[in-house]
């Protein structure tokens, strides 16, 4: 059975850390040596960092999005932002990576392409603001991966099956757990950060305008890092999700099953059918048709 509770109990029994337990279990299931599992995750972290650097290095634009990260960065430098440094830094990275994805840049789908900005935003935002050793970041990515594995097995990570709660919601929960680990929290706090965060985002629909992973996806990546960061802080403060995190994940699955198809990546509900979205869709379709006619 895939369970966060089981990982935490095993950590408490054996004295292994959360990432060590995730690796031990993964190695047992896959038959790979623990060092090989770690080396794969280490290489993924490098890919994620490279993609973030590429995303921040230019003005990458999709059909309807681009430039948000620069605006947020300039605003943060010029004024006294309402959000704290970590939120702002994480959101800037999340916006940049997500827009880079929309421009067909190479990203790490963690857990999906639509939610690809959230984890790098939280991990590298933490590194920039508080400092972190590379090996700790690898461990934090393993923590996030372990949480993501449980969500994938008990529920889903696909917007088409579970709505955006399963993509951006899962990414924010994975990031919250990773941050708790980086901040020195216990295995129990790592698990509760995921539960608190996911519980706060149940029911988020998947409603991409014109079927493109741009609106509302890019800005959702930017805003949801804040949810994950406060979820992490609450868990570090000793606040517990009274609904056990595994049960929250199960609730996410059942909410996803109850969502109508129009709110599951079909682009036929939510913000995707607002008057402006319909106008943008027509614009894009006309343009695509014009290119096809040439
Ligand atoms: S709205 Fe849909 S396509 Fe966009 S990030 Fe969320 S789940 Fe993915």
Image (spheres, rainbow, N blue to C red):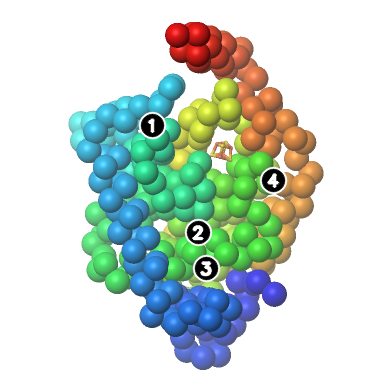
Q: Give the numbered dot on residue 174.
A: 2
Residue 211, percent across and down? 58, 28
| In the image, the residue with mark 4 has its CB under 8 Å from the nearest atom of ligand 1 | no
Q: Which residue is mark 4?
A: 161
Mark closest to the chain's N terminus, 4 or 1: 1
Comes first in the chain, label 3 or label 4: 3
Taking 178 as reference, is 172 above or below it? above
Image quadrant in which the N terminus is located: bottom right
**Label 3: which residue?**
146
Q: Write down the residue under mark 1.
A: 103
Task: Pick out the residue farthest to the bottom.
Answer: 14
Disc 1 is placed on an element classified as loop
In the image, taking residue 244 as reference, residue 116 lies left or right, namely left
- Cα–Cα gap, marks 4 and 1: 25 Å
Q: Is mark 1 within 8 Å of ligand 1?
A: no
- Quadrant of ligand 1: it is top right
CA–CA distance between discs 1 and 3? 29 Å
C-alpha distance separating marks 2 and 1: 25 Å
Q: Work out whether 58 lies above or below 282.
A: below
């Amino acid at each position: 059975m895939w369970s966060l509770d089981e990982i935490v109990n095993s950590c408490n029994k054996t004295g292994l850390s959360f990432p060590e337990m995730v690796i031990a279990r993964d190695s047992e299931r896959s038959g790979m040596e623990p060092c090989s599992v770690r080396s794969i995750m280490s290489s993924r972290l490098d890919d994620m960092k490279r993609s973030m650097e590429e995303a921040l290095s230019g003005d990458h634009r999709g059909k309807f999005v681009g430039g948000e990260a620069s605006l947020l960065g300039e605003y943060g430098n010029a004024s006294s932002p309402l959000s704290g440094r970590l939120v702002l830094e994480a959101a800037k990275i999340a916006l940049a990576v997500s827009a880079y994805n929309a421009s067909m840049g190479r990203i790490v789908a963690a857990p999906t392409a639509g939610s690809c900005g959230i984890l790098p935003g939280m991990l590298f935002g933490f590194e920039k603001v508080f400092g972190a050793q590379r090996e700790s970041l690898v461990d934090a990515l393993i923590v996030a991966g372990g949480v993501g594995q449980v969500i994938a097995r008990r529920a889903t990570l696909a917007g088409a099956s579970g709505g955006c709660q399963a993509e951006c919601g899962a990414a924010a929960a994975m990031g919250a757990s990773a941050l708790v680990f980086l901040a020195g929290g216990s295995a129990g706090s790592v698990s509760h950060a995921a539960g608190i965060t996911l519980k706060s985002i149940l029911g988020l629909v998947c409603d991409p305008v014109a079927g493109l992973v741009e609106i509302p996806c890019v800005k959702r990546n930017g805003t949801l890092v804040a949810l994950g960061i406060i979820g992490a802080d609450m868990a570090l403060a000793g606040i517990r999700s009274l609904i056990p995190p595994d049960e929250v994940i199960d609730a996410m699955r059942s909410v996803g099953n109850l969502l109508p198809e129009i709110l599951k990546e079909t682009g036929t509900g939510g913000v995707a059918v607002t008057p402006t979205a319909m106008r943008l869709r027509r614009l894009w379709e006309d343009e695509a048709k014009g290119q096809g006619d040439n």
